[in-house]
Image: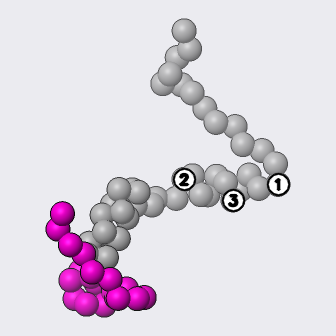
Amino acid sequence: MPNWCVNQIHIDGPDSVAIIELMTQPKPLLHQQASRAAAKLFLAGVGGLLKTTYPMTFERG
């Protein structure tokens, strides 16, 4: 059984420096980005900034 705590990634080739920088730079988690985007869309919709391109009506069914 392989030792899972010693796994390593070896990257080589012309783009190796760019790939290593991308993997090692700190970045926000995806769920944080999604939460922020959802909050912005909600606030924009409530504030009336988002409008449909043609008139629409919604009925409760």
CA distance separating discs 2 and 3: 10 Å
Are the residues at dot 1 and dot 3 in contact (C-beta closer than 8 Å)?
Answer: no
> Is residue 40 in view from this perspective?
no
In the image, what residue type sits under mark 2? Thr
Q: Which residue is mark 3?
A: 18
x, y (%) of residue 15?
A: 77, 56
Name the outermost residue toward the right: 14
CA distance separating discs 1 and 3: 9 Å
Residue name at image x 27 percent, y 81 percent:
57
In the image, what residue type sits under mark 3? Ala
- Mark sitting on residue 24: 2
Q: Quadrant of the N terminus?
A: top right
Q: How is the image coloured?
A: one colour
Are the residues at dot 2 and dot 1 in contact (C-beta closer than 8 Å)?
Answer: no
x, y (%) of residue 8?
A: 60, 32
Q: Which residue is mark 1?
A: 14
The crowding category of the residue bearing disc 1, from other C-alpha atoms within 10 Å (few below 14, some 14 to 19, many at least 20), is: few
Secondary structure, mark 1, is: loop
In the image, what residue type sits under mark 1? Pro
Whether residue 49 is in magenta: the answer is: yes
x, y (%) of residue 12?
A: 78, 44
Magenta region's main secondary structure?
A: loop
Range of the magenta residues? 43-61
